[in-house]
Amino acid sequence: MQGLWFSLLLTVHILVGLSLIGLVLLQHGKGADMGAAFGSGASGSLFGASGSANFLSRTTAILASVFFLTSLSLTYVASTKPKAPTSVMDTVKTEPAAPAKAPVPVTAPEAPVDSKTKDIPK
């Protein structure tokens, strides 16, 4: 589920970023206002002489806010992601070891005593 949110946020973030770039490129600079005063045709545009500036600047501000929020959201989602195991041994679940038992001493079996082996020292 967390991967779905990350993918969705990343898609929205990229689309908003591309839209923001397009809107900034559409806007006129500060020097373009003087050209509009001498009849460059900006007053006959779809939004009027100052309407396009207001619409584009407001849309840019809204998209910049959305871009900022998606950036913060992506940071939060990426930082709360569960850590992936770094080795195969991290994925193995071990059971607690049983307590160690004292070693049982091993003794050699006693040979039967007969008269022939009595002379041999041990």
Image (cartoon, rainbow, N blue to C red):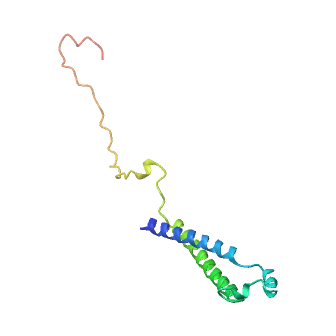
- Compared with 121, 57 (above or below) is below
Quadrant of res 31: bottom right
Residue 10 appears at what percent x and percent y?
53, 68
Q: Is residue 54 left or right of residue 89?
A: right
Judge left or right: residue 32 versus residue 89. Answer: right
Where in the figure is residue 102, as x and y percent of width and height? 33, 42
Could you tell me which residue is drawn at 54 percent across and 73 percent down?
Answer: 73
Does residue 6 lie above or below 61 as drawn? above
Q: Determine the residue positioned at 23% across, 25% down.
A: 109
Residue at 26% across, 25% down: 108
Between 122 and 53, which is closer to the camera in this rendering? 53
Residue 114 in picture, x, y percent from top left: 17, 14
User: How many numbered dots are placed on residues in this image?
Assistant: 0
| Of the pair 27 and 12, the residue shown nearer to us | 27
Q: Quadrant of the C terminus?
A: top left
Name the foreground residue: 5 vs 103: 5
Position of residue 30 measured from the top left corner of the image (x, y, whole percent): 79, 81
* Image quadrant containing the N terminus: bottom left
Does 27 sit above or below residue 87?
Answer: below
